[in-house]
Amino acid sequence: MTRWLTTEEQQAWRGLINLTAQLQSVLARQLQDEHGISLPDYEVLGRLHDAPGHRLRARDLGTSLAWEQSRLSHQLARMQRRGLVAREECETDRRGATFCLTPAGRTAIVHAAPGHVEAVRRLVFDALSPEQVTQLSDLTDDLLTHLHDSLGMG
Amino acid sequence: MTRWLTTEEQQAWRGLINLTAQLQSVLARQLQDEHGISLPDYEVLGRLHDAPGHRLRARDLGTSLAWEQSRLSHQLARMQRRGLVAREECETDRRGATFCLTPAGRTAIVHAAPGHVEAVRRLVFDALSPEQVTQLSDLTDDLLTHLHDSLGMG
DNA sequence: ACTCACTACATGACACATCATGCAATTTTC
DNA sequence: GAAAATTGCATGATGTGTCATGTAGTGAGT
């Protein structure tokens, strides 16, 4: 017997789906139009920028992003073609590949970050009271914990 | 001067992004594995199933889904190739295209819906108190309203 | 040292999404 | 009622994501 969703649950669920879809769409367009990079590009560039020496092993980058390995490999190949990152051999493990920011990559992330953060602030946090920010933080925390428990048991 | 995010805001933002990404991933895999359809397929099939006569004009389907027109056109072309939907000429507007569920499409959505809803319930709403469901509903509502206002003003 | 399992990464195929563009049918405007 | 603007949809190019698979390097057990 299927336990269907109540009206309020449906409202919350569809709201969540619509909200994130539209936010991603708006933020992606802004990055693409103003800086010529995609949201995934931004994520990768950000991690590399924060890393010591602006460089990371693909393995660690993947762990940090929680991306599938294949996705990261394709993404890095594309970014390498566009000159945003550069590939280096790993010295301690000949299988490994470390990637570092190119000057172009560094320029891109440094220029893109303020506008991106500003957009997130305007579109999201300017609409929320401090209590609501806490609520949102708690909600996502609870749900992510529950999700990982479910998958772990699953 | 960039207004950066506080620690709690960062927590909430990254939590929201991670949560929806992982939820979509899990739900998509479940639909694909158990019923051979994607999340976008599910959305389209659901709208068609709810429509009178299991049929809708592409235009109305697009409005209902809030999808870009080109996205819908490609999606419907793929679903038509796989025999999930069928195309008909529109009688009142010769430009128009109406799409209806095929028997295979009807079977797919009818079989997939209970498991999908059950997964949403288990992964999301089983973790939330009634107050939290209300919070989530209110939050998404506020944010979507704010988002549309922001885009409307531009 | 040799086998065997595992890890790190790449690649090709295909579904998905957006953009730019095209075109025919409809509506508006005069 | 003809020209102009708009609407409804399709299509090709390209970037993105997943799956299945391949390959080379590493490490553990013997």
Image (tube, coloured by chain):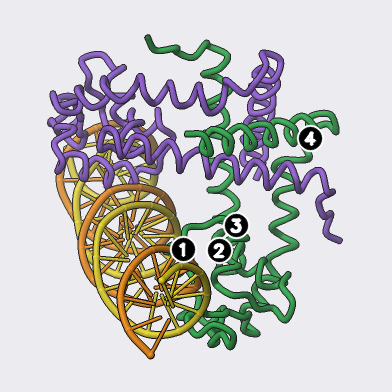
Chain colours: A green, B purple, C orange, D yellow
Q: Is B17 on the left or on the right of B35, as rendered? A: right
Circle 1 residue? A69
Q: Which residue is mark 3?
A: A30
**Mark in the foreground, 3 or 4:** 4
Residue A53 sits above or below residue A48 on the image: below
Where residue A39 appears, as percent x and y from the top left, is 56, 59
Q: Are marks 2 and 1 in contact (CB under 8 Å)?
A: yes
What chain does badge 3 belong to? Answer: A
CA gap, disc 4 and disc 2? 28 Å
Residue B25, percent from left and from top: 45, 43
* Residue at the spot of label 4: A133
Dot 3 crowding, Cα within 10 Å, few <14, some 14–19, many 20+: some
Q: Amino acid at mark 1?
A: Gln
Identify which residue is drawn at 33% across, 31% down: B42
Q: Are marks 3 and 4 on the same chain?
A: yes
Q: Earlier in the sequence, mark 2 or mark 1?
A: 2
**SS of the residue at dot 3?**
helix
* Badge number at residue A62: 2
Q: Both on one chain, marks 2 and 1?
A: yes
Give the mark nearer the N terminus: 4 vs 2: 2
Q: Amino acid type of disc 3?
A: Gln
Earlier-in-chain disc, 1 versus 3: 3
